[in-house]
Image (cartoon, helix red, strand yellow):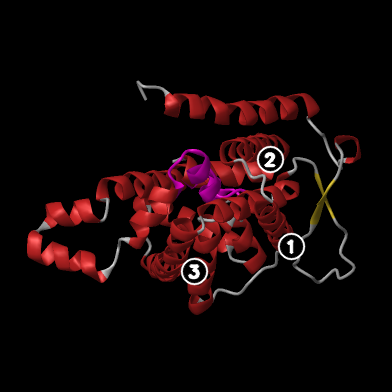
Amino acid sequence: MLMGIADLVPGISGGTVALITGLYKELIQSIDNLKPAALKILFQAGVGPFWKAINGRFLAAVFGGILTSVLLFSRLIEYLIEEESVRLWAFFFGLLMASIVYLIQKNKILTPTSLGLLLLGIIVSYSVSLLTPTVAEINYLYIFLCGMLAISAMILPGLSGAYLLMILGAYKIILSTVRQAQDLIFDFNQELFFKVVLVLGSFLLGIAIGLKLFSKVLRWLFDHKPQQTIAVLIGLMTGALHKIWPWQNQLLSLDSSSDKIQTHAVWPQNFEGDPQLGSAILLLLVGFFLLFGLERLKSSPHA
């Protein structure tokens, strides 16, 4: 569920949550196990061996949690981004800072090669985060490609799939379509139903294909270059820090007809609006120490 919440927020990745909670490698391996050979087990040995071969209980728990969060919290996240952005980003900034500290301590990124790869990850993530969000026309092939690209970012710590959707101009389209799908449960409309099916169907198909292709690459990297892969992933997370800094001012656009929006990080005293400094710092600290609390819980013999 935490992965689902993170994937809804532009600037933080569900892959970050998977990495810091220790689920990441098993998630990548389990997704890669979804291959034609698994279907052969299903037809020859039955549902039980097939379910075990694909690590079905694990995948059902993870993706069930993600889907639950998307359905339950999409409206809340949309509200918080609009109305409580400083506090929301403060919490996630603290969580991401703690993640970086924890992963560096755990993996001991000290060799010249690892440090070089960490720097590469920072440069890539920082460069992507500087791209300017725009607004796109609804095109189902484009929505399909957005799904492929977004899921690749969502399972990479530090690269936010939601922010990538903003860059591609599809974030509000997808979020509003999820909200419309919820509304259809209580007030069915045939025209809206077909629109929702086409948009979400195109997006989910892109996710499925992108997830399968990208997980294979990541599994190979973890099997053959684990330390180097972790170094790059930590770099990706570090490079994204400035984008979720709580205090962001919107840059003025010289082109008044442009739909593009760009922000830049500022100190609280230079923030155009109420900096909410006390509550923001409190939530930043909550986010920071929450990670270490989760880690203690995970390490507990009773967990």
Percent position of residue 148, x then y: 49, 69
Q: Are marks 3 and 1 in contact (CB under 8 Å)?
A: no
The numbered dot on residue 289 is: none
Q: Nearer the viewer, residue 22 or 144?
A: 22
Which residue occupies 63% across, 68% down?
A: 168
Q: Which amino acid does label 1 sit on?
A: Ser
The residue wearing badge 2 is 89
> Quick one: label 1, few (<14), some, or many (20+) residues within 10 Å?
few
Badge 2 element: helix
Left or right: residue 292 versus residue 87 is left
Percent position of residue 198, x then y: 41, 71
- Give the distance between the C-alpha atoms of the residues marked 2 and 3, in whole angstroms: 26 Å
Q: Which amino acid does label 2 sit on?
A: Trp
Which of discs 3 and 1 lies nearer the camera? The answer is: 1
Compare marks 2 and 1 and give the one earlier in the sequence. 2
Which residue occupies 70% across, 59% down?
A: 120
> Quick one: label 2, few (<14), some, or many (20+) residues within 10 Å?
many
Badge 1 element: helix
**In this view, 267 is above or below 249:** above
**In this view, 275 is above or below 24:** above
- Give the distance between the C-alpha atoms of the residues marked 3 and 1, in whole angstroms: 20 Å
State which quarter of the image contains the N terminus: top left
Q: What stretch is highlighted in magenta?
A: 4-24
Compare marks 2 and 3 and give the one earlier in the sequence. 2
Which residue occupies 38% across, 49% down?
A: 26
The residue wearing badge 1 is 127
Q: Which residue lies furthest to the front in this view?
A: 111
Q: Is residue 18 magenta?
A: yes
Compare marks 3 and 1 and give the one earlier in the sequence. 1
Q: What secondary structure do most residues of the magenta stretch adopt?
A: helix
The numbered dot on residue 148 is: 3
Q: Which of 205 and 233 is in front in this view?
A: 233
